[in-house]
Structure formats: C-alpha cells, structure tokens
Amino acid sequence: MKQLFKLTGALTLLMAFVLGGEVVAQGNTSITPSNFGDRQFRTDTVFSSRPIREDDKMYQIAVWRRIDLREKFNLSLYGTGVAKLDGIINAIYKAVVDENAIEVFADEEFTQPMSIAEFSNKFWINALGDSIFIKDMYYLDFREDFVFDGHRSEVLFDIKYLEIVMPAGTNAGVSQETVAFIRYKDFYEHFKNHPRHYWINFQNTSKHLPYDQAFDLRLFKSVVRKFTNPNDDLIADMVDPEHPNPDLQAYLNSLAFEYKLLEYESNLWEW
C-alpha cells in the first residue's frame, strides 16, 4: 500500500512538472472567469449589465429597437397622470441633472461626453423659450445584441445603451432628434432597487418592480428599427419609396424580422 501511495505521489509531481508546475482546476465559466492561462476571457464590462464571454457567443446580431411609451403595454414605464413625472424619462432626467449619477453622451460611439447643462438644455425649445413637457418625450430607443450563449445554451438579449429621442412633434414640428445616449450598465446599476423610480404595476400596486427587473423580464413592447445589415440602413429605408404605404410596410418588415428571431431560437432545439 505504501508503494502505491509513493507511486501516486510521484505521478502527481511528474504531471506538475510537465504542466509547468501549475495545476489548474477546471470549473471557471463566463460568469466567474479566472485571470490566468486560456481563461483570460474578453467580456463587455463597459456597457453590459451582465457580460457574456466573447468565446461563448455562438451567434450574435445587433438589433436597434424603439419603445413608444404611449402604447398600452408601456404605460407602466410612461408614468401616471397628465405630467408623467413618475415615468422613466423624468427618472433619467433627475438622475443626470439633479443627482449627477449617470453620464450622458452625444454619440452612440460614446466618444463625446455631454455636460449636465448641455443635457438639460435639450429639454428646452429655444425658439419659443418654453420647456418641453416630459409627457411629450415618449420615445426610448435602445441597442442590444441578440446572442446565443453556447455556455448557457440559451438565447440572451444583451442591451448596450439607451437613447432618449425627442419626437418630431415635440421638436417644434421639425424632425426627431436624439437627446442623449446612456450606457445601459449605468442605467441598470443606478435604478436597481431605486426607492422612488420604478416600473408601475397598475394591476397590483404592492408589486411595483425596479427598472432593472422590468428590463430583465422584458416588460415592455418595442419595435425593431434596424438590425445588422451591409448598408447600415433602417428598416424604413429598405422599403421601396414608391410603395403606397411605406410606413405600414416598414412595420410589417419589422414584425417579420422579429418572427425570424423567434424562429431561430425555436429551431435551436429541433435537433
């Protein structure tokens, strides 16, 4: 028996020598990666609230969506009453202007930081000198990656950023305008279990949800405006301009793309 123990110990030392003197236990994942060897995984720790290891992404496509807060399904984000002061747009405004808790940018590459004054001025119609009512800021766009995570064997929605958009009607009737871009991770962390700003449950007022949980559960209705394509076109730009109803056709094309994503996820488990 002693000879067996000696032989086992010798084999262990030999393996350690061959492997460079370092024995690594397997078990690190994209959720808890280690810091050495081939476990130095690249992850998005800047924008993603729950980073996915790049090596685990078996399929990925970028999707740009729009949440119209006026839609019935999105009223829990829009807020209550006429002014909508307890809605998500005013919550973001206060987080930036009053609390200086979220950094805002002028471009989607996040290379042009905006000052609080610049952001605040976006909520004024300079030509008239009047402030914009929060209820009139009803577009909230965002960009996400539709990802098949090979490690978890599931499809995930990895949101990268939010974009506050001023509708054409609000912007003195000219055209829609981007107010600011916000890293989704910053939004997610700030509003996690926030005591004053949350997704409103009109059916059960004892069960309001923080914004982070509402977005994790996809408690909103959105429309796809763009997806990864060679020309970087919006879906609306892909419609024939001579079509008798281009807006309706763009919406139908958006739904068709949505169904393709659902079909892709369903077909993953067909074989």
Image (tube, grey):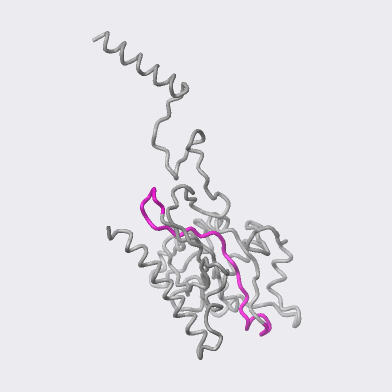
Q: Position of residue 66 (x, y in %)?
A: 52, 72
The quadrant holding residue 205 is: bottom left
Residue furthest toward the front?
Answer: 230
Q: Position of residue 69 (x, y in %)?
A: 51, 75
Residue furthest toward the left?
Answer: 1
Please state if 151 lies on the left or on the right of 196 as rendered.
left
Please state if 93 lies on the left or on the right of 268 as rendered.
right
Number of callouts? 0
The quadrant holding residue 17 is: top left
Along the line of sight, which residue is nearer the eye, 9 or 50? 9
Along the line of sight, which residue is nearer the eye, 263 or 156? 263
What residue lies at 50% left-to-right and 89% top-to-bottom? 245
Looking at the rendering, in which quadrant would you find the C terminus? Answer: bottom left
77 relative to 111, above or below: below
Judge whether residue 52 is colored magenta: no
Q: Position of residue 87 (x, y in %)?
A: 54, 70
Along the line of sight, which residue is nearer the eye, 91 or 30? 30
Q: Which residues are magenta?
A: 149-174
Looking at the rendering, in which quadrant would you find the N terminus? Answer: top left
15 relative to 31, above or below: above
Q: Position of residue 84 (x, y in %)?
A: 56, 75
Along the line of sight, which residue is nearer the eye, 210 or 255? 255
The quadrant holding residue 262 is: bottom left
Residue furthest toward the top?
Answer: 2
Please state if 14 lies on the left or on the right of 142 as rendered.
left
What residue lies at 61% left-to-right and 73% top-to-bottom? 165
